Structures are given as structure tokens and as C-alpha cells.
Image (tube, rainbow, N blue to C red):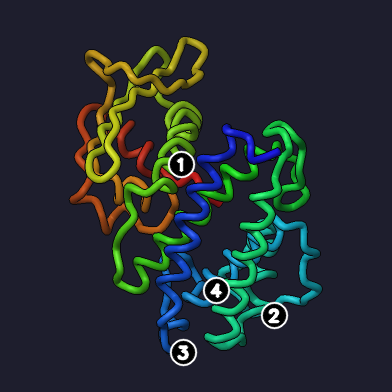
Amino acid sequence: MSLHPTLQPYADAWTHSIEAIAELVGPLVEADWNRRTPCPGWSVRDIVSHVIGLDCEMLGDPRPIHTLPRDLFHVTNDHQRYMEMQVDVRRHHTAPEMTSELEYTVIRRNRQLRNESRDPGTKVRGPLGAELTLEESMRGHAFNVWVHEQDLRAALGSPGNLDSPGALVARDVLLERLPEVVAGRADAPRSSAIVFDVHGPVEFLRTVRVDIQGRGTVETTPALGPAATLTLDWETYVRLACGRVALESVQDRVKAEGDPELTAAILRHFTVTP
């Protein structure tokens, strides 16, 4: 038995991103591990710790028994507390300890993927005990690791891989969440259409149509006379959607046409990651 074809793109995306991360952090001196990243409260070391922790949980390892300090002001909810555990337990690890654990974890995960024969619909445990299908779990994991690769690249001044296999997974994940942004959070008018025109390493033109019941769907067909059109580059789209940047700092990279109140509401609610 081998990995189901449905799962292979997510395994490939993870492999590409994790190898890029290992290559990025391998030569870093100790001080570089303390550089700030776009994730509030997290350094380069913290991002790598988080990635290691995510993969350890994919392997089924027990979570660390650890008490978080009370002065972590960026930790404000249960989801953040859950994610912080794997990070804080490694906060005093040295650079060689970090790279060694990353390398060992990648070896173990590669072995797991080579032996993976379960059906994509198999139920597995996700973060905070949530029940997911194996496909949902691997897809979300590929997305997370690529986003964190981009966090590290931003912190280290080493841009790249904006069109990698992980980027294509991220595109699909973020597009799936657009209807909730437009129809749910921004409360776009019923029977309206909003166009997203994204250019750069990953290009797409998508229309979110809101039906008479207020439900949104993503379509590939362009809309005639949309209520609003948002044009931006792929990197800015990702940074906004993942909450890595404030709108005010990239406003000049976003072209908004149509109903100004609607476009403002969409952009205000654009972040879809926890």
C-alpha cells in the first residue's frame, strides 16, 4: 500500500516547505534564532518550535507536560494556549538542539508518509481534540507549514517559494474561506457579486456571489457589474488573509473599486487564520 493519490499533493507540499525551512535555519547563528517574525510574540526559534510541534502531533507523539508562564501577553485564548505549549517548552533550546530535533522529526515524518496507507476519509485527532479526516488534517498541515515558511523568510530577509506546491495549497485553502469573509463577516448585499483579482507568482480571478439567502460561493466566472472589485498581489493577499500585516501598512498595494463601505468591511475582516 502507498499514499492515496488524493493525499499526495499535500505530502509533496509539506516536503517542499519543510526542506526549505531546514535550509533556511541550518546556517543561522544563535542570535538569528531570536529575530522577530510576523507572528506576534514569536521569534524564529518559536516558529521552528511550532512547526516541530505540529509534526510531532501528526506523528501521534504525546503533548509536552508543561506550565506556561503568566507573562505571555500574546496568548489570550485556548487555541493560542494550545499552540504555545510546544513553543514555550523549546524556548531555551540552542541552535544545534533546534536543528537536530527538526532533522529527526522530518526523518520520522517522511517514514510515516512512506508507510501511510489509510483512506483520506479516515478520522484523526486534530488540534484541541477536534475530529478531522486525514485529508483535512494533511491539507491544513501543508498550509500551516508553508505559511510559517513565509514567516521565516520575512524575518530572515530571504523571500521565495511564493509559487511552490505549498503556495497552491494555500491558495485553495484561503479561497474556500472567502465566502465567510464576504457573505458572513462583511455582510455583503444579497444577490451581489464581489471580484478578487490577484496577480503575481500565483494568479487567479474569482467571484464571490451572494445569493438571495445571503450564502456566498466562489466561482471562476467573472461577474458583470460587481458590487466591488479588489485587486492585489498574491503576497499581500496571503499576508492580509493570514493576519501577518495591518491593512494600513499595505493599503497602497490594494486597489478597491465599487462600494467603499463594502470593500472596507471585506478588508477589515479579511484575516481567516486563528
Label 4 residue SS: helix
Q: Work out whether mark 4 precedes mark 3 in sequence or the reverse, and give the earlier one.
A: 3
Place of residue 158 in the rendered image (x, y in percent of width and height, measured from the top left): 30, 69
- Measure the alpha-carbon separation of dots 2 and 4: 15 Å
User: Residue at label 4?
Assistant: 46
User: Residue at label 3?
Assistant: 30
Depth order, front residue of 132/250: 132
> Residue placed at 56% from the left, 69% from the top?
74
Q: Answer above or below: position of 30 versus 35.
A: below
- Measure the alpha-carbon separation of dots 3 and 2: 23 Å
Foreground tag (4 vs 1) = 1
The numbered disc on residue 69 is 2
Q: Are marks 4 and 3 in contact (CB under 8 Å)?
A: no
Judge from the rendering whether residue 250 lies leftward or rightward of residue 272; answer left or right: left
Q: How many marks?
A: 4
Place of residue 187 in the rendered image (x, y in percent of width and height, measured from the top left): 45, 28
User: Residue at label 1?
Assistant: 169
* Amino acid tagged 1: Val
* Amino acid tagged 4: Asp
Instruction: State the image quarter where residue 106 is shown.
Output: bottom right
How would you rate the neighbour count of disc 1 (Cα within 10 Å): few for under 14, some for 14-19, many for 20 or more?
many
> Residue placed at 72% from the left, 57% from the top?
59
